Image: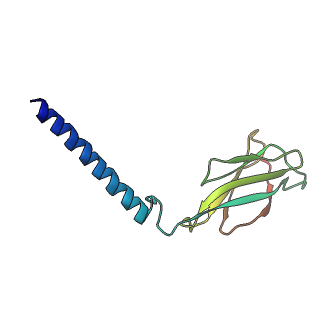
Amino acid sequence: MKNNRTYKWVRGLLAASAFTSVMFIMQACYGTPNYRNEESFSYEVKMSGMVTDSASAQPLPGINVSTDISDEVAVSDENGQFCLSFMVYSDDDEGFKLNFSDSLDRYAPLDTLIVSDFSDINISLAAK
């Protein structure tokens, strides 16, 4: 009876070792799985610019700037300047949106579709 248990234990150990070896060889040959499109790659986009009032052209502080493909949010400073960094994947062919919203609800929100990589963008918001 003891020999039977030992045999099963050794057999299980050898099976686990064989499975681990096969998985190691497959990863070495084929790499780790890419759950995105096989042709995809990512790159960082850095957007910066200024938010102004459309009537007076004065800089607007406290405007939230975000994008629909990231959780990153930037807030314009006292000079209306903002800087936002986020990752873009090559299979996001349709571009992305930058969203401008006022946390104090003084200005109408604005969604802007960005198709290519702009490094500097200036936006004017209209008062409500």
In the image: residue 77, left or right of residue 73: right
Question: Residue 74 at x, y = what percent?
Answer: 74, 47
- Which is nearer the eye, 82 or 111? 82
- Judge by depth and name the residue closer to the eye, 48 or 38: 38
Which x, y percent locates residue 108?
73, 49
Q: Residue at x 38, y 56 (%)?
A: 24
Within the image, what quadrant is residue 94 found in? bottom right
Residue 79 position (above or below residue 96): above
The residue lying at 47 percent from left, 67 percent from top is: 38
Quarter holding the N terminus?
top left
Residue 118 vs 48, above or below: the answer is below
**Of all residues shown, which one is farthest toward the front?**
3
Residue appearing at x 74%, y 40% in the figure: 103
Q: Residue 47 falls in which quadrant of the image? A: bottom right
Task: Return the residue found at the far top.
Answer: 2
Q: Is residue 34 left or right of residue 117?
A: left
Q: Is residue 17 above or below residue 96?
A: above
Relative depth, front residue between 60 and 116? 116
Instruction: Report whether 80 appears left or right of 71.
Output: right
The location of residue 97, given as percent across then percent down, is 64, 59
Q: Residue furthest left?
A: 1
Nearer to me, 59 or 90: 90
